[in-house]
Amino acid sequence: MKKTILTIAIAVMGFTAAFAQDTTKRHHMQMSKMSKLTAEQRAEKATAAMDKKLSLTADQKAKVYAVELDRAKKMETWRSADRDAMKGKMKDRKADMDASKKQLDQILTADQKTKLDAFRAEAKEKMKNMKPRQRDGQGRKSKPPVVSNPPAQG
C-alpha cells in the first residue's frame, strides 16, 4: 500500500514538473518564430494589427505599410550588428524609432492617434509589470526552483 501511494505521489510530481515547464517553451517558440520573419512579413503583420485596432483606410494602410517596412528594415540591420556597436548607437536607434512614430502620427486621424497612444501606453504598462527574464526575449532559461525539502532517497 505504501509503495502504491509513493508511486502515485512521484508520478503526480513528475507530471506537475513537466507541465510547469511547458509555458516557457511555448514563449520561446513564439519568440523564435518572430525572429525568422522577414522585414516585409513584419511590416505586413504590424500593418494588419494597426488596421484591426484603428480601422485604417486603404490609403492609410499603404502609407503605414511603407513606414513599418522602413522600420522593420532598420531593426533588421540593428539586430545583425554586433552588441558593442549596438550599445554605442542607442541614441541613433531611438531617434529612428521616434521619427517613424512621427510619420505614423501624420498619417493617422486624431481619433486614431488617441487609440494608438492608448495601445502604446497599455503595452508600456505591460512591459513594466513583466519580470526581467520575460522582458529580455533572449530565450534565456531561468534558474531552477530551489527545493527546500527534497524527497528522501531510498
Image: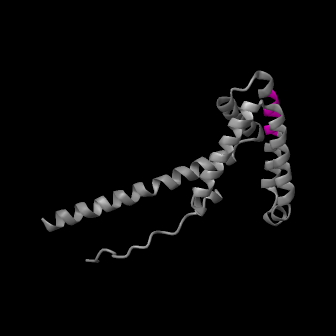
Residue 147 vs residue 29, the one in the foreground: 147
Position of 40 compared to 2: left or right? right
At x 70%, y 38%, the residue is: 116
**Mostly what secondary structure, the magenta segment?**
helix
Residue at 66% across, 47% down: 121
The picture quadrant where one finds residue 52 is top right
Q: Nearer the viewer, residue 67 or 33?
A: 67
Residue 5 visible to the viewer: yes
Q: Is residue 24 above or below residue 65?
A: below
Numbered range of the magenta stretch: 62-69
The answer, for residue 46, to whether it is visible in the render is no
Front residue of 82 and 135: 135
Q: Position of residue 15 (x, y in %)?
A: 35, 57
Residue 57 is situated, as x and y percent measured from the top left of the image, at 75, 23
Which of 24 and 54 lies nearest the eye of the viewer? 54
Residue 106 vertical placement versus 5 (above, below): above
Give the residue furthest to the top: 58
Give coordinates of residue 76: x percent, y percent. Answer: 79, 49
Q: Is residue 97 above or below residue 59?
A: below
Does 65 lie within the magenta span? Answer: yes
Location of the C terminus (image quadrant): bottom left
Residue 39 falls inside the magenta stretch: no
User: Residue at coordinates 55% horizontally, 51% vertically from top-left?
Assistant: 27
